[in-house]
Amino acid sequence: MTDIWHQVFGFENYGELLVLVKNSIFAGAILGVVGGLIGPFVMTRDLAFAVHGISELSFAGASAALLLGVNVVVGSIGGSLLAALLIGMLGSRARDRNSIIAVLMPFGLGLGILFLALYKGRSANKFGLLTGQIVSVDNPQLLSLIIISVIVIAGLFVIWRPLSFASVDADVARAKGLPVDTLSIVFMVLLGLATAVSIQVVGALLVLSLLVTPAAAAMRVTASPFLTPLLSVAFAVTSVVGGILLALGGGLPISPYVTTISFVIYVVCRIIGARRNRRGASRVPGTAVVAR
Amino acid sequence: MSADAMTTSTQPVLSLRGASLSFGGRQLWQNLNLDVQPGEFLAVLGPNGTGKTSLLKTILGQQQLTSGSIEFLGRPVGRGSRRIGYIPQQKMLEQGTPLRARDLVAFGLNGHRWGLPFTSKAERARVDEVLESVGATQYAQMPVSQLSGGEQQRVRVGQSIAGHPELLLCDEPLLSLDLHHQRQVSELVDAQRKALGTAVVFVTHDVNPILGMVDRVLYLAGGRFQVGTPDEVLRSEVLSYMYDTPVEVIRSRGRIVVLGAPEGYGAHDHLEHAAGVRE
């Protein structure tokens, strides 16, 4: 029992380890920012399932890259973008979209398993694609992850307002002359990139914990368009960085730590939101009206 | 306000010339000539499936005319415009939408602008002013998804007028609202066009809530159309001709009831109204 405990939470030589993973923590924090910023859009555009579908094709791309001996991040991005564009172009209506994702997802996972079965290299690499491996990512790859993250963040900042408008209120946004369909495709590209980088941290099976859970938690406690992304980013960064720090000593993959932190935050936010709603049965929005 | 009095001096906001629209061989309307003047309130009436919503889509450039031309402020219509305010059919916003009532109104003002959603002081002042004018100040900070249908539609009216549009398109904005809210929402639209000379194209299957405000009616039915004042169009002989069957228009206590419109073409709308009045 204590053995398992020490494996899950080990802190021997912690200071030395910390120095070794300094870059991973930095990269993890940036990925947290990406996940936290894009998450609210994933939620309002009802794309949680799409994220999962994209991640499976991204996994296929990454394992193909592993097999061919080329850069895994490149393979991962290739698979992501292909899936994101297919889903974006073929699935403008929710029902079409879900069936396309349901068709793509097992196909991607199957391809990925095939490539991994053919791959003769280190098995840790294989497992890492599914469950996360940021600590084992080397520095040049880390740099590429950071560059892609910055591109995603910059892209989101540029289209932020029209994208929010089109996400919650597409008909009116279109009437106002916004290029709603183009925005949708651009967003899918950004989402594809964000998924590809998240896979490097938490793995293909667990990306939702980074791209959806923090935003879902934030939206439980606020409806402010400013506070939602801020909280979502705070939650995502806490999950990733916290996960890396906790996983450090034990030698286990970081993903269970990340997903658990992110899950606990969600549960807490749900409880807070539920209590507030019960109190708000009189529908007085607390702060705002009192201030007037 | 008489439309004719204004035709001479001002440029029409909206102008259709020989406009026809058909779907898969079915003619919805053809050779429609129509000018909508600033400040004019035009109601578009008729049963379902006669191209009322399609008319709005044509004005918004989302639907191409089969033939003829359509101009907004003297130019062929584009794909939507910032100078058009649009109130969609009521569709409740989803639970958890990260948006407060005031944010929805702000979108009507600056939702087209790129970048992060910061608003200037002047914009915030305008949003406050609009919220005040539609009586929504009280729930300005509430999440939109927690508002009732009537409250959401008020905020929608606010959103549509926030940017001082020259044309207000309303697509069944009163649907699923109770009588009290129907009157409030239509009065808000009416006040806006009176105060700022905004032209209004108001699609509805029930003219009664807006009867006292309407300058002209465009009635679509059976592949035909009629344009004129409510008194000119909403008469038994006119509608009988359009439906090609005897139809009776009854006026009772300031309400209009259409009886005997044939089945199909969504004519049941009118029968439902008739039933509603009898109750």
Image (spheres, grey):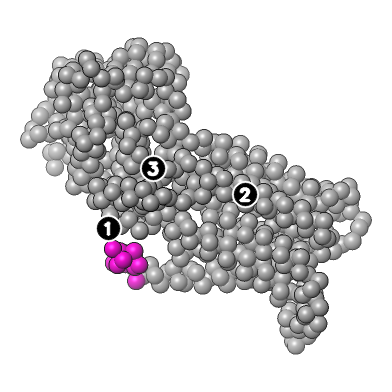
Horizontal arrangement in the rendering, residue B274 relative to residue A193 (left or right): left
Disc 3 and disc 1 on one polypeptide chain: yes
* Circle 1: residue type: Gln
The subunit carrying tag 2 is A
In the picture shown, does residue B111 fall above or below A277? above
Estimate the x, y position of residue B7 in percent, counting from the top left: 22, 17
User: Considering depth in this image, is A47 or B46 the residue closer to the camera?
Assistant: A47
Q: What residue lies at 57% left-to-right and 72% top-to-bottom?
A: A264
Residue stretch rendered in magenta on the structure: A279-292
In the picture shown, does residue B57 fall above or below A82? above
Horizontal arrangement in the rendering, residue B215 relative to residue A26 (left or right): left
Q: CA distance from mark 2 to mark 1?
A: 36 Å
The subunit carrying tag 1 is B
Residue B247 within the segment the image draws in magenta: no
Q: Quarter-wise, where is residue A145 in the image?
A: bottom right
Whichever of callouts 3 and 1 sits on the residue coming sooner in the sequence is 3
Q: Which mark is residue B109?
A: 3
* Circle 2: residue type: Ala
* Circle 3: residue type: Leu
Q: CA distance from mark 3 to mark 1?
A: 20 Å
Residue marked by disc 1: B138
Q: Are the residues at dot 3 and dot 2 in contact (C-beta closer than 8 Å)?
A: no
Residue A285 within the segment the image draws in magenta: yes
What secondary structure is found at the residue carrying circle 2? helix
Residue marked by disc 2: A154
Total labels drawn: 3
